[in-house]
Image (spheres, coloured by chain):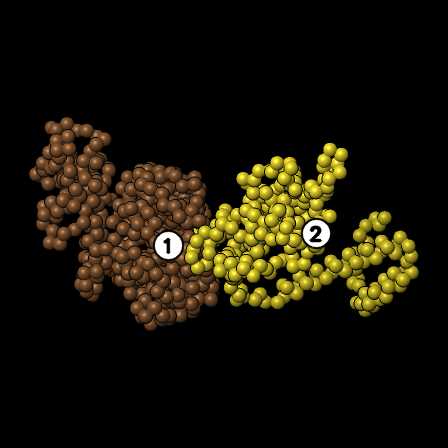
Amino acid sequence: MDEAEDTRRILTRLVSETGDSFERLFDLPYNVTPEKLALLVNHLLENEEPAPFLFFVNGKEITDCLDKVMVQDDIGTENVLEIIYQQQAVFKVRAVTRCTSSMPGHAEAVISIGFSPNGQYLASGSGDTTVRFWDIYTQTPFMVCEGHKNWVLCISWAPNSKMLASACKNGVILLWNPETGKQIGKPLAGHKQWVTSLAWEPLHLDPRGRRLASGSKDGDIRIWDTALGNVERVLTSHTQSVTCVRWGGSGLIYSSSQDRTIKVWRPDGVLCRTLEGHGHWVNSLALSTDYVLRTGAVDPTAVHRGKGQDVNESDIKELALKRYSAVCRLGEERLVSASDDHTLMMWLPEKEKKPIERLTGHQQLVNDVRFSPDTRILASASFDKSIKLWDGRSGKFITTLRGHVQAVFMLAWSADSRLLVSASADSTLKVWNVKQKKLELDLPGHADEVYAVDWSPDGLRVASGGKDKILKMWQN
Amino acid sequence: MPQNEYMERHRKLHGRRLDHEERTRKRAAREPHKRAQEARKLRGLKAKLANKARANEKIQMKKKIKAHEEKLTPKQKEGKVSEGALPVYLLDRDVTSRAKVLSNMIKQKRKEKAGKWDVPIPKVKAQSDSEVFRVLRSGKTKRKGWKRMVTKVTFVGENFTRKPPKFERFIRPMALRFKKAHVTHPELKATFQLPIIGVKRNPSSPMYTSLGVITKGTVIEVNVSELGLVTSQGGKVVWGKYAQVTNHPENDGCINAVLLV
């Protein structure tokens, strides 16, 4: 009987996830393994370096051999089976395993943390009204920037890594030079209440990185010209606090608000669309292109292969555009919103007013949502102590990651989309293996709630900060 | 009743008398003396009423002065930044100040070995045997008196079965058995109803400890898993913590305790 099974063969067609297929059909044995399939695909694609692949049949991953997936759905011998292949990142990020340094310095809770897009600088904002830059190579304090008069609520790096914008609870935005730690230009004042979110214009639209959008508690979104230091436009339509602002790759600005809507704006001030559907505050937005917009022209894979990061000024725009369009080929820009009504919604904000999917399952409000860098998986963090993974394309539920004993505040993906780190009120960070859908590592060490976490774009380091005022760096 | 506003009219026609200002000033200056005299003269209920009215008047006056002063002094800038910074996503949520005190397992272990804790109620009145136990007479003619009934609140483990009557020296009545305690977290200032795991130490006598007698000052172990506390070193979830009883459970019908952190 076994022998008979071994000799069974099936006609298959290999299809990429975007839908292009090879013309040839393949007559494969039932016991073909993913490793063998990967060899085949690598050969067909004429890859110089063999890349890892995942294979799916009818949405089920082939983990062991084709036979295992085939048992349930029996197709006749005449039909052609479609096997979908997904290329994985060639480089691998190693999971961070230990705390390499605890850096005291802030006199109050660390509220915001950010690695620069080129992965060379680290900045943090705190309740002690300072912005601090840290030297990530020696893991020491680098610069203390004083200028704010209240808690520094959010910081955001310009996509060309030459500027850091920080916003405080008084509603003032300051710009800093990461090289010298000096303030650039005059303060951008105008918001009547605190600033909740900052977003820079993507690099491929403007290689100089001049324009910055900020959303505030007073319900306004302001677009600033950072070179001139003035307000270019004020977008007012939200009736309550704006919670999150994203500047999409096609030039549209997306803003979510506590008035339960998400609005889509053109940067010239025209309100394109209002996306309605949530029943309570919308807390957070994620774009499928978030990672590529954040890193701009710097390709983390190139850094891993040891190729230089130095990009000519003139090439920046082209490089960024190339990377952006490469991601867009995997599917249009999708927007996911997380809300207080315990659900997430997936939208195609460039086209439709209706959500394409409503992702339900969380039992408490959803605080943070992030697309993986390869846009295939979506992770959401909720106050119900769990993290849920969803299919980034269809929004189908994949799995729940449990382990935290208190609310999960924030998430960060590694650059290769294989690992996920989460920060929680229970004072731990946890690293999750996305492929095995399991806890990879538990990182205790903070003495109190962890408010902010960031994984550097090149995947080497994780930085976290929280209520215990200490900034911790984690490495493998 | 005046038929017209003739006083006003006269004033308009001829002006005030020349010494009007001086007279009003003097009258105002005399006012306190007059009031004092009156106050000294008044007796009985009238004095009471007058004093009350005057006190009220003074309060109003002081309030007014204060308000004026506040208006006059230039507002100081809010130079002080409030403490307890929160990230943006928690600003609009009314998070209670969750001063998290991570339990330090090692410290607790060490204390356990030494057998003493720094407890909120250090000195407790010792409970004598006669207070805690009641003698039950047994035997056909009730001549024997070796049986005792516990008259205080007790904690009895889940899988406890009573011994046969012949061997049961101590009876712990069902009505006085407790499973839960109201435990206050001293830094969160919040109270939770938590299941009791065991009685750790009754300061009066080790025998009470082994019997599970809970009186004021007893240290009990409670299940804190629903509080979501985490140890500072290992990041492990804490589930058992000690608490000291602060009330007289036998009188109140409930157990109130303070978590030892």
Give x and y (percent) for residue A384.
Answer: 43, 45
Secondary structure of the residue carrying tag 1 is strand
Please say if the residues under marks 1 and 2 sit with CB atoms less than 8 Å apart: no
Residue identifier under label 2? B127
For the C terminus of chain A, give its image quadrant.
Answer: bottom left
Q: Residues within 10 Å of mark 1 (few under 14, many from 20)?
A: many
Q: Mark 2: which amino acid?
A: Gln
Residue identifier under label 1? A442
* Residue A173, quarter of picture: bottom left
* Residue A346, quarter of picture: top left
Q: Chain A in the picture: what colour?
A: brown
Q: Is residue B158 left or right of residue B7?
A: left
Chain at tag 1: A
Secondary structure of the residue carrying tag 2 is loop
The residue that appears at 10% across and 41% down in the rendered structure is A22
* Residue A152, quarter of picture: bottom left
Is residue B2 visible in the rendered structure shown here? yes
Q: Mark 1: which amino acid?
A: Asp
In the depicted structure, whether residue B68 falls above or below residue A21 = below
Chain at tag 2: B
Is residue A214 visible in the rendered structure shown here? no
